[in-house]
Image: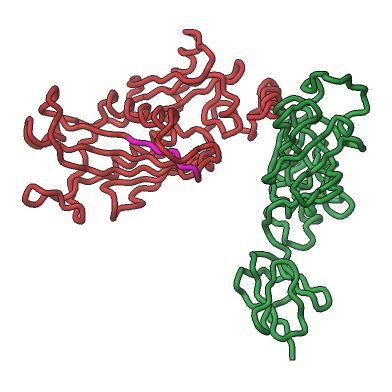
Chain colours: A green, B red
């Protein structure tokens, strides 16, 4: 006889028993100890069919193919650039993936992207040997201009973006800010009006803090509405 | 500090806004907590300025006076920039920032004549009290100088002499005698970013600073110490302005003590 000890969406801590019996299977951050399922990370329980997994409240960023990330140029070589995307190994951006301009052999690549520049790029390949290839060819992929950089845990990025970009669209509509969110948790934003920009920052921080609450989009809408008059 | 944030920050300053929306001469909320470690230290305090948090502790020891001041006690200030407070801080021997921080705090207390050194002497030429002030930032969100100076003064205010039995210090018991604290010098650091004067910067603003001036001020508005930092120069007019702001602002900080 198998039964679930915790409820769906309950917050659990490492070591907590989640289920008894062999009918449930351990998913992300869950291990099996004899006939019990045990949590290994702080997070929220998610049960889908027989699979019990934990959506961690905080986890390190793991690069995946197709992710749009914001990275910092930390190296300029002869064939491309090295980019820090917030995990232990630097990513590569080769000349052919960086621009559609014709670049002559031996040209000074720092004219395009220099040390300390921030870029929005797409991960096109993740090899098992920790080699990550980036590309700048795609809509919205560019060198970032002056603006604020915020760091949020990468596990909260989906909440900040929302379903089909609903959450970030809401913040953009109310604050008239330009906002770019990288899957690696780096957020770039700039607003013409400094007060609205600060409102956007506080809204993103609020989403980050309350990411586990359901109906968050409505709450954030209420929050932005209440602060709108003060601008 | 990355260039894109700095450029944006300077743009905001020109529009008359700080990075976190405060006024140019506005401090974050200051709180002081006394006696946070009363069992292990003779005096201690925790100071928070916004999210910046600094602990200070006072320990006392009996030693032989220096030959050039046989009738005076002394103080020693030590600051350690803990790696947990800021990712840029490394563990190991104190670097130039930690030494500067401790010396600026030391100078305000010493030159402001906060403690009556003569009263710290127990027997001329033979015995004196050394007051050791240790400063530990727990979280660095900018403006460690002012937080450290306030924490050091608060810890001194909290301190009591330990009991002396048979010429030995018994650290387990304290006497009710407070330190001979006669004046309360506090420092206020004014930062110059572009053409703007700013007090109490957050960490992003602090890394965009061109130059800074730490001014130690006594209760009556007298100056007792100065320390200039940063790569850029200051004109005499700049310094006049900064000192004026410091005198005004220390009155405000003093209320928290």
Quarter where residue B221 is shown: top left
Q: Please report the residue visible at 54 percent of the width from the left and 37 percent of the height from the top.
A: B88
Q: Nearer the viewer, residue A33 or B179?
A: A33
In the image, is residue A22 part of the stretch drawn in magenta? Answer: no
Q: Please report the residue visible at 65 percent of the width from the left and 71 percent of the height from the top.
A: A39
- Across and down, in percent, residue B180 comes to 20, 36
- Across and down, in percent, residue B136 comes to 41, 42
Task: Specify the segment rendered in magenta.
Answer: B78-83
Quarter where residue B220 is shown: top left
Residue A23 is left or right of residue A101, and the answer is left
Residue A33 is left or right of residue A135, and the answer is left
Note whether A200 is above or below B105 in the view shown.
below
Does any portion of residue A200 appear in the rendered image? no
- Across and down, in percent, residue A12 comes to 65, 70
Quadrant that contains the N terminus of chain B: top right
Q: Nearer the viewer, residue B21 or B248?
A: B21
Quadrant that contains the C terminus of chain B: top left
Does any portion of residue B124 appear in the rendered image? yes
Which residue lies most toward the top here? B236
- Across and down, in percent, residue A108 comes to 79, 19
Note whether B245 is above or below A218 in the view shown.
above
Q: Please report the residue visible at 13 percent of the width from the left and 31 percent of the height from the top.
A: B65
């Amino acid at each position: 006889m198998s039964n679930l000890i915790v409820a769906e969406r309950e917050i659990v801590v490492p070591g907590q028993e989640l289920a008894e019996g062999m009918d449930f299977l351990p998913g992300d951050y869950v291990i099996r100890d004899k006939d019990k399922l045990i949590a290994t990370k702080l997070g929220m329980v998610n049960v889908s069919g027989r699979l019990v997994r934990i959506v961690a409240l905080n986890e390190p960023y793991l690069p995946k193919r197709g992710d749009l990330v914001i990275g910092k140029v930390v190296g300029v070589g002869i064939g491309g650039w090295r980019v820090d995307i917030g995990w232990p190994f630097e990513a590569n951006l080769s000349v052919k993936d960086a621009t559609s301009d014709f670049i002559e052999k031996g040209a000074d690549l720092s004219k395009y992207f220099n040390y300390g520049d921030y870029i929005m790029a797409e991960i096109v390949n993740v090899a098992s040997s920790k080699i990550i290839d980036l590309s700048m060819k795609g809509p919205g992929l560019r060198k970032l201009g002056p603006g604020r950089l915020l760091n949020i845990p990468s596990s909260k990025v989906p909440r900040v973006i929302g379903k089909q970009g609903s959450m970030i669209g809401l913040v953009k509509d109310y604050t008239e800010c330009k906002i770019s969110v990288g899957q690696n948790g780096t957020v770039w934003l700039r607003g013409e009006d400094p007060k609205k920009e600060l409102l956007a920052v506080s809204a993103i921080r609020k989403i980050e803090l309350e990411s586990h609450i359901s109906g968050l989009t409505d709450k954030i809408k209420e929050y932005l509405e209440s602060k709108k008059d003060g601008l | 500090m990355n260039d894109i944030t700095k450029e944006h920050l300077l743009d905001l300053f020109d529009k008359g806004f700080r990075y976190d929306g405060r006024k140019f001469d506005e401090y974050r909320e200051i709180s002081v907590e006394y006696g946070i470690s009363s069992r292990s230290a003779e005096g201690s305090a925790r100071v928070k300025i916004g999210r910046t948090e600094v602990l200070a502790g006072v320990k006392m020891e009996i030693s032989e006076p220096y030959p050039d001041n046989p009738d005076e006690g002394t103080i020693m200030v030590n600051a350690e920039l803990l790696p947990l407070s800021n990712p840029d801080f490394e563990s190991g021997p104190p670097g130039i920032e930690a030494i500067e921080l401790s010396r600026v705090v030391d100078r305000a207390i010493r030159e402001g004549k906060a403690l009556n050194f003569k009263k710290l002497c127990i027997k001329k030429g033979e015995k004196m009290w050394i007051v050791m002030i240790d400063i530990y930032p727990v979280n660095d969100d900018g403006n460690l100088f002012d937080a450290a100076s306030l924490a050091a003064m608060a810890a001194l205010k909290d301190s009591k002499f330990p009991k002396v039995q048979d010429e030995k210090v018994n650290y387990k018991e304290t006497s009710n005698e407070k330190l001979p604290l006669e004046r309360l010098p506090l420092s206020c650091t004014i930062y110059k970013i572009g053409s703007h004067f700013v007090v109490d910067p957050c960490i992003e603003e602090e890394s965009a600073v061109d130059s800074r001036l730490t001014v130690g001020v006594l209760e009556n508005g007298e100056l007792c110490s100065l320390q200039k930092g940063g790569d850029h120069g200051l004109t005499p007019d700049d310094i006049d302005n900064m000192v004026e702001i410091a005198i005004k602002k220390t009155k405000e900080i003093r209320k928290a003590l």
